[in-house]
């Protein structure tokens, strides 16, 4: 059992929080209110960023002290919105939200994962007819191992998880968000994920 704070109480955050609680973890969900988020982050061992990516950097940088020595699992993508509300352009081209967070929070161990799929797949990967892939990006091997164990609790088999390397590799997975609006316009909001076929 691990104490986990999920920052963001929308569809992504709520889905993750419910699944992690079912797996036996002690989970607190916090909205974007600074005081509430700070209190939740302070008492958790692991913090999950499920806030909208466009504002994540500012919100989390303000929690630098609360996030010191914590694992920050970043599942967000920082994009502008198109006229239909779907993702349009990357906010950090040539970089990534995860890299920006790690730079702003040097004493926090940032791990990027679960950002290459629609939110229902995050907690129910086996429901897809094809095997999905969950990617890990981060500088700290121990933090990535902890996150790998959390993914296992969410139903991810170990062979479905690919460690891409350091935090810089998050720019590749974050760029995959550019597929999303086109796939949704083509096939609707049917759950899908990026998968590596071998």
Image (cartoon, rainbow, N blue to C red):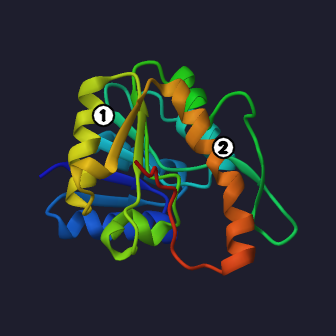
Front residue of this view, candidates 186 and 22 = 186
Residue 179 at what x, y percent from top left?
68, 57
Q: CA distance from mark 1 to mark 2?
A: 21 Å
Residue 59 shows in this picture: no
Tag count in the figure?
2
Q: Which residue is located at x 33 percent, y 70 percent?
A: 124
Q: Residue furthest front?
A: 198
Q: Which residue is located at x 42 percent, y 68 percent?
A: 121
Q: Height in image: 122 above or below 160?
A: below
Q: Residues within 10 Å of mark 2 (few under 14, many from 20)?
A: many
Q: Which residue is located at x 52 percent, y 69 percent?
A: 192
Residue 73 at what x, y percent from top left?
40, 42
Specify which label sits upstream in the sequence, 1 or 2: 1
Q: Height in image: 72 above or below 87?
A: above
Res. 30 image quadrant: bottom left
Residue 19 at what x, y percent from top left?
28, 68
Q: Which residue is mark 1?
A: 144
Q: In the drawing, does residue 196 fall left or right of residue 69?
A: right
Q: Residues within 10 Å of mark 1 (few under 14, many from 20)?
A: many
Front residue of this view, candidates 172 and 66 = 172
Q: In the drawing, does residue 194 fall left or right of residue 2?
A: right
Name the disc covering residue 175, or none.
2
Q: CB of mark 1 within 8 Å of CB of mark 2?
A: no
Q: Secondary structure at mark 1?
A: helix
């Amino acid at each position: 059992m691990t104490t986990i704070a999920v920052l963001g109480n929308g569809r992504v955050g709520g889905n993750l929080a419910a699944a992690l609680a079912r797996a036996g973890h002690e989970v607190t969900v916090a909205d974007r209110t600074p005081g509430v988020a700070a209190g939740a982050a302070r008492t958790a061992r692991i913090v999950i960023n499920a806030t909208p990516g466009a504002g994540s950097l500012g919100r989390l940088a303000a929690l630098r002290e609360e996030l010191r020595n914590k694992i920050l699992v970043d599942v967000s993508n920082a994009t502008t919105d198109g006229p239909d509300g779907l993702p349009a352009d990357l906010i950090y081209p040539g970089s990534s939200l995860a890299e920006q967070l790690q730079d702003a929070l040097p004493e926090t161990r940032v791990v990027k994962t679960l950002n290459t799929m629609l939110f229902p797949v995050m907690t129910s990967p086996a429901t897809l007819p094809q095997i999905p892939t969950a990617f890990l990006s981060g500088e700290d091997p121990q933090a990535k191992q902890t996150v790998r164990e959390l993914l296992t609790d969410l139903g991810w088999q170990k062979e479905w998880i690919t460690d891409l390397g350091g935090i810089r590799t998050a720019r590749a997975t974050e760029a995959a968000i550019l597929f999303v609006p086109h796939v949704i316009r083509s096939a609707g909001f049917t759950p899908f994920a990026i998968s590596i076929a071998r």
